[in-house]
């Protein structure tokens, strides 16, 4: 008899734990995008995303201000993705923006685009 009361408790614990892990997946993606931004982007775009990173004064073209809703809403998500993956030259922008294809997966780049949309509090051009 004891067996039948333990099994439902174990199943309930497993289902709850699995649900908790799944709910954390979205949070982990957001953390990962912020971590990747801090690792790869702040040198040029700055810690606040305003385009005033430590490398900005030495660049021929000013880095994009990721907090500008006006500037960022004029860009399609696909173009932002392409710029991150293939570099600025791929979208007709600065050759000094490198490709991050070897540093981030497509899924991480997609999360980065979402992170940038959060920074500008805007949506991309349709």
Image (cartoon, rainbow, N blue to C red):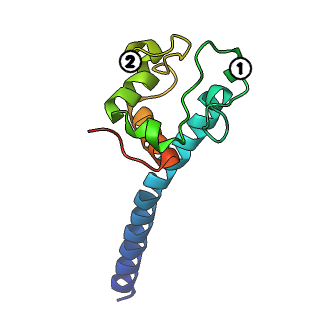
x then y, percent, for residue 105: 43, 29
Q: Please state which of residues 28 and 93 is positioned toward the viewer in this rendering.
A: 93
23 vs 125, left or right, is right
x then y, percent, for residue 104: 48, 28
Residue at (45, 36) in percent of width and height: 71
Residue at (67, 31) in percent of width and height: 52
x then y, percent, for residue 65: 56, 34
**Looking at the rendering, in which quadrant would you find the N terminus?**
bottom left
Task: Decide: is 89 above or below 104.
Answer: above
Q: Which residue is mark 1?
A: 57
Q: Please state which of residues 67 and 37 is positioned toward the viewer in this rendering.
A: 67
Task: Decide: is 63 above or below 71.
Answer: above
**Looking at the rendering, in which quadrant would you find the C terminus?**
top left
Residue at (56, 12) in percent of width and height: 96
Residue 109: mark in rendering: none
Residue 91: mark in rendering: 2
Separation of marks 2 and 1 at Cα, in angstroms: 22 Å
């Amino acid at each position: 008899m004891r067996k039948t009361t333990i099994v439902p408790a174990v199943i309930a614990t497993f289902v709850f734990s699995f649900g908790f892990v799944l709910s954390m997946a979205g949070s982990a993606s957001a953390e990962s995008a912020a971590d990747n931004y801090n690792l790869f982007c702040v040198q040029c775009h700055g810690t606040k995303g305003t385009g005033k990173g430590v490398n900005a004064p030495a660049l021929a073209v000013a880095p994009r201000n990721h907090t500008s809703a006006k500037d960022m809403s004029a860009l399609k998500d696909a173009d932002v993705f392409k710029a991150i993956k293939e570099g600025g030259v791929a979208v007709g922008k600065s050759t000094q923006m490198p490709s991050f294809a070897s540093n981030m997966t497509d899924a991480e780049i997609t999360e980065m685009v979402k992170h940038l949309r959060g920074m500008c509090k805007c949506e991309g051009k349709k």
